[in-house]
Amino acid sequence: MKSTEDRNDHRRPLRLRLRAGDQIYEALKEATAAAIGLYILVLAAAPAVAAQPIARNPVALVVEEKGRTSPELPPYSEIMSGDAVEIPDASSLVFIDYRSCNRETVSGMTVNFSPSGFSTSRGDKRTEQKVACPQSLAPDSGGDNSSLLMRGIDSGRGFPLVAIRSTFVIVGARPHRFARVRIKDATRTLVDAKLHGTRFDWPPSTPPLEAGSVYHMVLLPERANDSPIKLSFRAAADSPGAPQDIVLIHADR
């Protein structure tokens, strides 16, 4: 007859397996807890990611500022969606609203600009006049327009239209980086002038643009490591909205 100790021998491997399993389980618990703790620490130490800002698109063009406004707005700078401008009673602001193509003159109020237009705190010192909508020019894509003209196969179609009496305004993130402008027709250079700011008026001593003709403009940067941009357009008859049409040159596109 077997002793009690002998009868318990066959249970020892099972107990050893249970103890080993418990040890593995406890080790896994500790490892998981450590991993979770490390993940929390990493999240806490990571910088917060700022929400993506809402796109701010240009909605108006400053034409003139008399007196002081808050903020200060240089002539022929663009006003962005979301901007608010305070104009005291002794000051005035003239701007062209892109949405309505109205030339607005305001004084003694706050003007809030949005994608759907603008609103004012009051309207007793506000006047408006319908004008020609500002035209837009973007740099040539790969110089295709210039190639067509040089080959003599372009009839002038497909080029942006520009009034023969125009005021050119450079807009974008860095509009002041250009120092010189050159304008050519099919055979000669018509304008080679230094730029003073972002606005360029057609020189009075230069023959005006001819309706139907194609022209090429080159804006030369002030710094040698910046690239010039080339634009092409076709002259059209004056639009009836204003004595001079405003042409916006989108230098960043």
Image: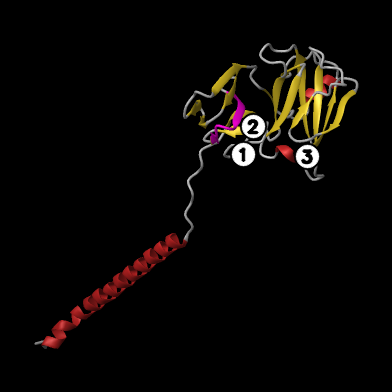
Residue 163 pos. (x, y %): 74, 16
User: Taking 84 as reference, is 23 left or right?
Assistant: left
Residue 46 pos. (x, y %): 47, 59
Residue closest to the far right:
188
The circle on residue 227 is: 3
Q: Is residue 94 magenta?
A: yes
Q: Residue at x 75, y 40 (%)?
A: 177
Position above or below: 11 against 220 = below
Specify the quadrant of the image occupied by residue 72: top right
Specify the quadrant of the image occupied by residue 38: bottom left
Earlier sequence position, callout 1 versus callout 3: 1
Earlier sequence position, callout 3 versus callout 2: 2
Q: Residue at x 79, y 12 (%)?
A: 211
Q: Which residue is denoted by mark 2 in the rendering?
A: 65
Tell me the crowding category of disc 2: few under 14, some 14 to 19, or many 20 or more residues within 10 angstroms, Cα based: many
Position above or below: 37 against 158 = below
Q: Quarter of the image for the N terminus: give it.
A: bottom left
Residue 23 pos. (x, y %): 29, 75
Q: CA distance from mark 1 to mark 3?
A: 30 Å
The circle on residue 186 is: none
The circle on residue 72 is: 1
Q: Residue at x 53, y 24 (%)?
A: 125
| Circle nearer the viewer, 1 or 3 | 1
Q: Secondary structure at mark 2?
A: strand
Q: Are marks 2 and 1 in contact (CB under 8 Å)?
A: yes
Q: Secondary structure at mark 3?
A: loop
Q: Quarter of the image for the C terminus: give it.
A: top right
Query: What is the magenta range?
Result: 85-98
